[in-house]
């Protein structure tokens, strides 16, 4: 059975980006928020360290300094006008969160307190600056709670534990709605709408070691990719240097912001060699690579010599307990390590997708080298690529991204809905989803989705992680080909219609494959090293040939076609990145 | 510094080395799936090999992914922040992702949390829980007009409600409360924790309204101070203390 709904606007995802957009839209147009998780379960809630804005509460600071750091941190692949816009709107966006009750930590005179974070500097790189606003080490939790509270206050309509699985277009190419699967009943729902905003978050689950939730499977990106919308800059995936050894759970950069340092097996503070000025607070791609280098040269720590140490033993106890309570607890629970006395073993962990659905500064999805908007289609947050993070996102810039562009996207979408009419639905709108699910349910024997997923995660971790080569990526391409064939034969054990998470996990694996393929193809094509994309066989940045965004399109035969579009420069001249 | 590091390395190595072998874990899981077996719940046992440092959540995944795909549970973050996977482990409410195999092997019992309708296996209907949450006006109330910058709040004022801001709405507390089990009207500890978070926030002006709601027959005075909720909270929130503070506030105001 299929149920039909009609709204002006549909927002897919209830993390920070989706909720912020919902607050903006729901007051003005009939809005439904569809989320596969209860809103407060979204991964925004796990963000720890902070959200930055040049408030200048603790040290002199200006949005323009922030914009410079963002552009430089992104290894000049950042669209500069958009970055500047984000940094300017940051200040107001933070005050707004405070007005809605976000419990920021405070300075002695009652203002929002700020702390250091990697890559954020005063006056274009002179020295680290205190720019990150924070609520202990649960800033994301507080943002998610605060935004959800505002939605409760506004009586926003939620469809929780509904999985959006397909995007609908009218025959003339306008956004017409989405198809969703209701987890509780197994029923399909068609949501007819004038506009849809995707805010489905990241895709870290394609890697074995990740800070991302089990549910971060790149759904929105894949749904649109299947419908001909490109994925932008997929080769740029951030590997955060300090994940809990083997588990990938994040230990926030705030640990280093508060004075924690990295040591190799010999007890040497190795970052002094790689980034003499900012040392342990260098951008993440640099620190992750430095860790790799240390491990490669035999200075890795731990029994397998494949970790390094995070050291906070010298920090005052109250800093550890009051400013980093959660992180400290992770080390205690999951590693059995007492960080006040012992070193914490860490390794890089897949953390953040810089790439995603291409959008402009109003959240409109744009396609092609000319960035042409698709009427009614929007995206915001980690699933989107504006691009303000370029080749490497700075810490605290993503929580900022979700509130600034969630707000801008929601606002533009509301305006669009006021003027637009409802496009007609295509015939049998739920057909694609129905056929996909029926085939999986009907197959009595076939590949086990969990096994395929493990293979995908293991091989992406080996071949498409911090350090890449042509040989490795070619191998990865082959492995993906094999996985794709076996995925066509996936069977699920649960044939029921009630809370069939077995079925949804199999569907999510399909989304992961649709994220991994463009990532690998774009990485293979990009014969340079920039930001998070490091090619051992092409260790230089090459602005002459590669100062451009990649766009990956899915071809009818499933293969990937690449296209490029220029980076929006104009404020800062690309320069070598030194710290 | 180098010798220092060496010592630590040795202890960490030992811990890791001692933990490298797999252990046998038998999970006794309470099942419920009306599509398969009607309205009766039943027990299933699965025996798996697991790393002692794995989470119970990993062990449940091992069951789901390699033994019985129909096993249903909620989870997302896998490190105790999203509040999805509250279950009863050996009779106590825990987050499956915050329990390590080494602490429960060789055998553990896993059941859905109590007091909310079970929908399938470990999945319960959370709607009554969220209804309680919504009933306490869980958002900042202040109509005094917003300053151009932030509202000021001293570190001491901020500290006053710090503990209750940690709540992840996992329901471990509410579903371990004997009064909640017995009496459908009681809003339960989690909703009071959420109310506390605003009542003691110096920026909020809605305390009176919330206290009125909580002074009602479904409110705080149902609580018999048994501390189950505090023991159950995976975020270490002093739930009972928060409830006491709300009670005191109501009494002082003489509602
Ligand atoms: C551990 C960790 C710590 C971090 N710390 C920081 C930090 O300190 N500072 C910072 O700036 N950034 C940080 N980040 C990054 C930042 O938190 C995320 O990039 C950001 O929160 C993403 O928000 P979002 O709204 O885009 O997505 P999410 O919060 O992940 O939300 C995604 C939403 O989409 C929904 N969804 C997904 N697929 C579907 C579907 N098919 N159908 C329906 N709904 C769907 C989900 O239910 C969910 O509601 C951190 C990230 C991690 C993992
Ligand atoms: S202290 Fe009160 S709320 Fe907590 S479990 Fe006991 S009766 Fe319930
Ligand atoms: S108070 Fe603790 S146990 Fe209760 S819902 Fe909040 S986090 Fe969970
Ligand atoms: S899975 Fe998020 S709290 Fe356990």
Image (spheres, rainbow, N blue to C red):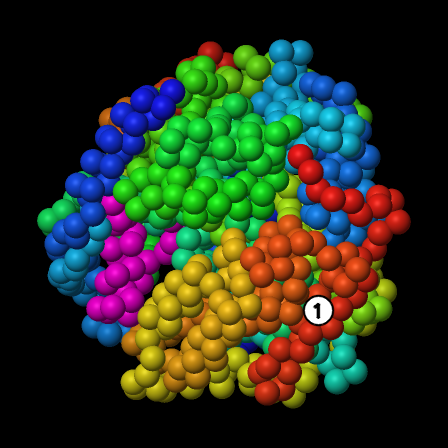
Left or right: where does residue A52 sit relative to residue A296?
Answer: right
Q: What secondary structure is found at the residue carrying circle 1?
A: strand
| Dot 1: chain letter | A
Residue A90 in sight here: no
Task: Name which residue lies at 14% across and 47% down.
Answer: B105
Say if A397 sits above or below A270 in the image. below
**Residue at (11% x, 50% y) in the render:** B107
Residue A238 pos. (x, y %):
57, 51
Residue lying furthest front? A297
* Mark 1 lies within 8 Å of ligand 1 (Cβ measured): no
Indicate the quadrant where residue A557 lies.
bottom right
**Considering depth in this image, is A475 or A314 the residue closer to the camera?**
A475
Identify which residue is drawn at 25% across, 68% down. Answer: B66
In the drawing, does residue A328 fall left or right of residue A80?
left
Q: Which residue is mark 1?
A: A551
Q: Quadrant of the C terminus of chain A?
A: top right
């Amino acid at each position: 059975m299929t149920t039909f709904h009609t709204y002006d606007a549909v927002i897919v995802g209830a993390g920070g980006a989706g909720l912020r957009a919902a607050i903006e839209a729901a007051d003005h147009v009939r809005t439904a928020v569809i989320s596969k998780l209860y809103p407060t379960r979204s991964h925004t809630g796990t963000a720890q360290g902070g959200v930055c804005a040049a408030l200048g509460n603790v040290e002199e600071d200006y949005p323009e300094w922030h914009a410079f750091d963002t552009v430089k941190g992104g290894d000049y692949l950042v669209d500069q006008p958009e970055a500047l816009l984000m940094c300017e709107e940051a200040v107001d966006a933070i005050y707004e969160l405070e007005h809605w009750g976000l419990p920021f930590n405070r300075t002695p005179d009652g203002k929002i307190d700020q702390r250091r974070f990697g890559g954020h500097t005063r006056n274009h790189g002179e020295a680290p600056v205190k720019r990150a606003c924070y609520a202990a080490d649960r800033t994301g939790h507080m943002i998610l709670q605060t935004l959800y509270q505002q939605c409760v206050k506004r009586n926003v309509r939620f469809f929780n534990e509904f999985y959006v699985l397909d995007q609908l277009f009218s025959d003339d190419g306008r956004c017409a709605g989405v198809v969703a699967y209701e987890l509780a009943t197994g029923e399909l729902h068609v949501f007819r709408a004038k506009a849809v905003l995707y805010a489905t978050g990241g895709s870290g689950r394609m890697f074995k070691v990740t800070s991302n939730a089990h549910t971060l499977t790149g759904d929105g990106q894949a749904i649109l990719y299947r419908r001909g919308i490109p994925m932008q800059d997929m080769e740029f995936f951030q590997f955060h240097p300090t994940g809990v050894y083997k588990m990938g759970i994040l230990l926030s950069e705030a640990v280093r912001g508060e004075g924690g340092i990295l040591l190799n097996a010999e007890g040497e503070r190795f970052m002094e060699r790689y980034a003499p000025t900012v040392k342990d607070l260098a951008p993440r791609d640099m620190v992750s690579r430095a860790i790799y280098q240390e491990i490669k040269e035999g200075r890795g720590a731990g029994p397998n010599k494949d970790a390094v140490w995070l050291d906070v033993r010298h920090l005052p106890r109250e800093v550890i307990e009051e400013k980093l309570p959660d992180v400290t607890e992770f080390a205690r629970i999951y590693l059995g390590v007492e960080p006040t006395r012992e070193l914490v073993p860490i390794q890089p962990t897949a953390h953040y997708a810089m790439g995603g659905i291409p959008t402009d500064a109003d959240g409109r999805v744009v396609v092609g080298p000319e960035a042409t908007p698709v009427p009614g289609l929007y995206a915001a947050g980690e699933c989107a690529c504006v691009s303000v993070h370029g080749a490497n996102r700075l810490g605290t810039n993503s929580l900022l991204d979700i509130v600034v562009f969630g707000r801008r996207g929601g606002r533009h979408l509301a305006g669009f809905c006021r003027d637009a009419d409802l496009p007609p639905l295509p015939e049998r709108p739920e057909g694609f989803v129905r056929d996909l699910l029926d085939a999986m349910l009907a197959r009595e024997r076939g590949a086990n989705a969990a096994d395929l997923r493990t293979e995908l995660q293991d091989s992406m971790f080996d071949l498409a992680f911090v350090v890449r080569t042509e040989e490795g990526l070619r191998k990865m391409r082959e492995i993906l080909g094999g996985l794709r064939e076996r995925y066509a034969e996936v069977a699920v054990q649960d044939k029921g219609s009630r809370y069939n998470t077995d079925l949804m996990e199999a569907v999510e694996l399909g989304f992961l494959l649709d994220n991994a393929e463009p990532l690998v193809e774009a990485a293979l094509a990009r014969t340079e090293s920039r930001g998070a994309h490091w090619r051992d066989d092409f260790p230089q940045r090459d602005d002459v040939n590669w100062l451009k965004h990649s766009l990956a399109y899915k071809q009818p035969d499933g293969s990937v076609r690449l296209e490029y579009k220029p980076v929006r420069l104009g404020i800062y001249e690309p320069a070598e990145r030194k710290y | 510094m180098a010798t220092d590091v060496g010592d630590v390395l040795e202890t960490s190595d030992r811990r890791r080395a001692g933990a490298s072998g797999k252990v046998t874990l038998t999970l006794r899981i309470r099942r419920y799936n009306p599509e398969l077996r009607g309205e009766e719940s039943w027990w299933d046992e699965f025996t798996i090999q697991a790393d002692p440092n794995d989470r119970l959540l990993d062990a449940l995944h091992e069951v789901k992914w390699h033994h019985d795909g129909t096993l249903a549970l909620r989870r997302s973050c896998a490190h105790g922040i999203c509040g999805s996977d509250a279950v009863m482990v050996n009779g106590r409410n825990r987050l499956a992702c915050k329990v390590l195999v080494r602490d429960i092997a060789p055998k553990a019992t896993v059941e859905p949390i109590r007091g909310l309708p079970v929908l399938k296996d470990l999945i319960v209907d959370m709607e009554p829980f969220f209804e309680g949450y919504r009933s306490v006006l869980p958002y900042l109330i202040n109509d005094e007009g917003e300053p151009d910058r932030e509202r000021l709040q001293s570190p001491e004022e901020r500290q006053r409600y710090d503990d209750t801001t940690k709540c992840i709405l996992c329901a471990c507390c509410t579903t371990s409360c004997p009064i909640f089990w017995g009496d459908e009207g009681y809003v339960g500890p989690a909703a009071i924790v959420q109310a506390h978070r605003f009542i003691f926030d110096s920026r909020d002006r809605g305390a009176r309204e919330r206290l009125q709601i909580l002074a009602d027959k479904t409110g705080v005075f149902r609580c018999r101070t048994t501390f189950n909720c505090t023991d159950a909270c995976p975020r270490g929130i002093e739930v009972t203390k928060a409830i006491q503070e709300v009670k005191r506030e109501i009494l002082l105001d003489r509602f």
